[in-house]
Amino acid sequence: MTDAKKTYDQLRSARWMAPDDFRSFGHRSRIMQMGYAPEDWVGRPVIAIINTWSDIQPCHAHFKERVEWVKRGIHQEGGFPIELPALSLSENFVKPTTMLYRNMLAMETEELLRSHPIDGAVLMGGCDKTTPGLVMGAVSMGLPFIYLPAGPMLRGNYAGQVLGSGTDSFKYWDERRAGTITQEEWQGVEGGIARSYGHCMTMGTASTMTAIAEALGLCLPGASSIPAADSNHQRMAAACGRRAVEMVWEDLTPEKIITPAAVNNAVTVAMATGCSTNAIIHLIAMARRAGVPLTLDDLDRVGRTTPVIANVRPTGKGYLMEDFFYAGGLRALMKNLAEKLDTTARTVTGRTLGEGFETAKVFNDDVIRPLSNPVYHEGSLAVLRGNLAPDGAVIKPAACAPEFRVHAGPALVADSYDALKAIIDDENHPMTPDTVLVLRNAGPQGGPGMPEWGMIPMPKALLKKGHRDMVRLSDARMSGTSYGACILHVAPEAYVGGPLALLKDGDIVALNVPERTLDMRVSDEELAARRAAWQAPPPRYGRGYGVMFSKHIMQADEGCDFDFLLTEAGPKVPEPAIN
């Protein structure tokens, strides 16, 4: 790098620690109260370690230990580490959904970095919403930071069968409900599907978002592919600590990394991995925090010309993230994808994206395919529009039965998840494989928080007849580990009066993935009459965080950020006064 290096007196932390005044005396005396000496901080950058560990976060169960490796790296490079715990957002346990709190984590991250004497940061995350939440907040603050991904867990196993978290849960649950597996087999799957710490080892939302972070240039090369239980992960954690210190001296801030080229790289890599549908929401939110106006149309444009080349479940067959790592990992995938990437984009290493993967090799070309032999000829996701979704909806074409990519059938509408459960658990509910099963009032406002209810279970009435897929439609999200002909993120959502609120049982819903259309075959006159009769539902919250969420959450096509957190919402927040 040719940029001039910072000096100690130019560091943010020096504003707190260096002056010969009463306030700085208080800072120094109180840090000495904790056993530190001037040798710990004088002349050294202070590096925050934003740690999303908690006792109820299985994806980050190793972070209590891993943070010590980060501290080791910071010390090795002459920095002063400060661990700051943040919201853990455990996907499995937080209700109604972690998506309700992603923006809270973003706010917490931004304000932790702003309010403390911090010069740079290592962000520790991996579980679905922690990557976008941490990155969004750190980007808005603007300090140098590096992202440390939690890493995928080891392969699941039961009775000699490889199990993928989430993906096989849905598959075996359908079989359990269909009566084809026993209680004992179901319990065996339960005990074998998640065998180690780390996030989901399918190409679910967690693996998708850490891959996106690396493609944006926010991780060390190859970091997102390392399994959580691999000793390479510990070495990577220490390397993150060392590099964070160097980034502070180099003043390598996020606006120098997250450029339009970097965002386009991230979209391209996401499409090639067979990414989660959740990627759309988080990518838009992350990009816009960096001042890059990413839209659904941009994502669909890239998806049309970028094939899926990662043969990893649920879009791929047979392989999981551990196999992906052994096959060469994300560096190898990006090398295969190089002609579609801007390899000159800068990364947290100070070098280019291309330099980070120039020595990568593919060791299994069935796991990481060449462009000439893709898993699917287009990208992972497709954006649909029409009179049901004027602001867009999303589908994962490669993960659904081909016959449903062009389909028309009668709607069967549930206004709540409880109503949906009554339908799917009724073995005699009248429907056919052509039926389009609809769940509405489950979007950002209606859920509330847009829960992962869009992976609508197959109804027993069809399971018993041997059917394993059908068109399902919702304004909710679905788990990135999911699959099937699920249309999601319908915008505007039904709860705020989007056209989905006007759909009735029996209306014909028409889907055409190649033409990117989604319509209900109802006349404009009839829709106008239904609109006039529609009544807005009452607010979900009367007090607390939920009121703020409801007043400021944006729709799915806009990234579900809070309107007041957007870069253009107001002037840059000033540095805090130290008085």
Image (tube, helix red, strand yellow):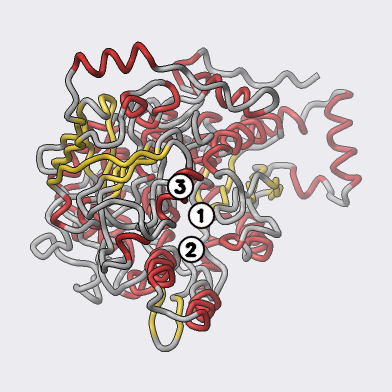
Q: Earlier in the sequence, mark 1 or mark 2?
A: 1
The quarter of the rendered structure image containing the N terminus is top left
Q: Can residue 304 be seen in the rendering of this structure?
A: yes
Q: Which disc is residue 151 wearing? A: 2
Q: Is residue 495 left or right of residue 82?
A: left
Task: Give the SS element for disc 1.
Answer: loop
Name the residue type under label 2.
Gly
Circles 1 and 3, Cβ within 8 Å, touching? The answer is: no
Picture layout, residue 267 above or below residue 200:
above
- Say what amino acid the circle numbered 1 marks: Gly
Task: Say whether residue 269 is visible.
Answer: no
Residue picked out by circle 1 = 126
Numbered label tally? 3
Residue at left 51%, top 44%? 247
Tell me whether circle 1 and circle 2 mark residues in contact (CB < 8 Å): yes
- Sequence-first tag of 1 and 3: 1
Q: Position of residue 37 (x, y in %)?
A: 84, 48
Q: Residues within 10 Å of mark 1 (few under 14, many from 20)?
A: many
Pointer 2 and pointer 3: residues touching (CB < 8 Å)? Answer: no
Q: Is residue 103 above or below residue 177?
A: above
Q: Quadrant of residue 358?
A: bottom left
Residue 561 % position (x, y)? 47, 29
